[in-house]
Amino acid sequence: MVNEALSLHAPFLYRIYSVWFRHVRVYSQNLLANAFPPFVEPIIFLIGIGLGLGRFVPDINGQPFVQYLAIGIIVTPAMFTAAYECTFGTFIRLKYEKIYDGMLAAPLTAHDLLIGEILWAGTKGFFFSLSVLVVVSIFGILNPFQVIIAPLVGFLTASMFATIAFIITSIVDNLEQFNFFFTGFMEPMFFLSGVVFPIEQLPSWLKPVAEVFPLTHPVRLLRTYSMGDMGLTQLWDLVYCVALIAAAGWFGMRRLRRQMVD
């Protein structure tokens, strides 16, 4: 209560910024090592699958397979970086390094801290989506104006998976239990959300499952934008993402706040 009272002396946006800036400083100390995997992995996947296997795959919806794959690959680094940041990263800061104990000694509330974490995850999603977009544009795989909204979709995707990761982090007892989330949920979702092939090609019983997966919606939003085919379905995709951020964020922050205060 004392901490929350003190926090009223600093503007809300400044408190959020202070959390975000703390993560920027820590992350930038090993910038190349930290940014190498989320930047290079989608490029390797695109070269191996898109340029290699793509030679034997017919056009999809009028697009060469490598272009089809590139649009999906722009979004996935945002998903994975946010999920890792707010599962392993948040858990270690909370349970082992006790970083949050020190941060909460400052005029910050637990909600300030967690909203700052979401903003930081969204920032990483923005820049990694932008980085992949620049690379595929340089190699002539995509016209950058064809998917100019990609960084914003990356920010939205990362914010969504940050809030989902908060819920998972509030449930697990140790780091090993994150394997259920990543192997049992994230990896199947990667292949069943329209990144590698259209969900219309899935068996009829599996299509409703694909519609529930969070990744399906930003991928479809970006893909239909690239084709100039926006409509009510894309409005639903946007509403789905925003509603999930609000619902998962509220629930996840509520559970994590208890652990921080306790």
Image: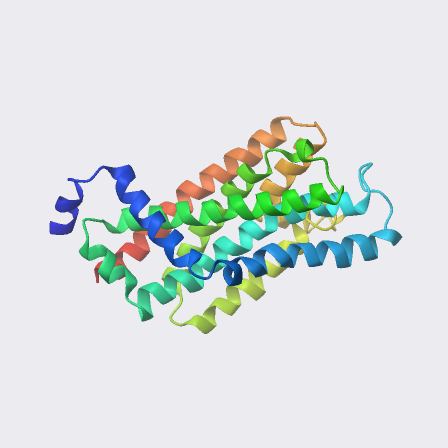
Q: Residue at x 55, y 43 (%)?
A: 154
Q: Residue at x 21, y 59 (%)?
A: 261
Q: Name the quadrant containing residue 257.
A: bottom left
68 to the left or right of 105: right
The x and y percentages for residue 232 are 61, 27
53 to the left or right of 160: right
Q: Is residue 1 visible?
A: no
Residue 183 lies, with reference to residue 239, above or below; the image says below
Q: Nearer the viewer, residue 95 or 233?
A: 95
The x and y percentages for residue 60 are 81, 42
Q: Nearer the viewer, residue 203 or 88?
A: 88
199 to the left or right of 24: right
The x and y percentages for residue 121 are 45, 50
Q: How is the image coloured?
A: rainbow
Number of labels in the image equals 0
Q: Residue at x 23, y 62 (%)?
A: 101
Q: Is residue 3 visible?
A: yes
Residue 101 lies, with reference to residue 150, above or below; the image says below
Q: Nearer the viewer, residue 39 or 82?
A: 39
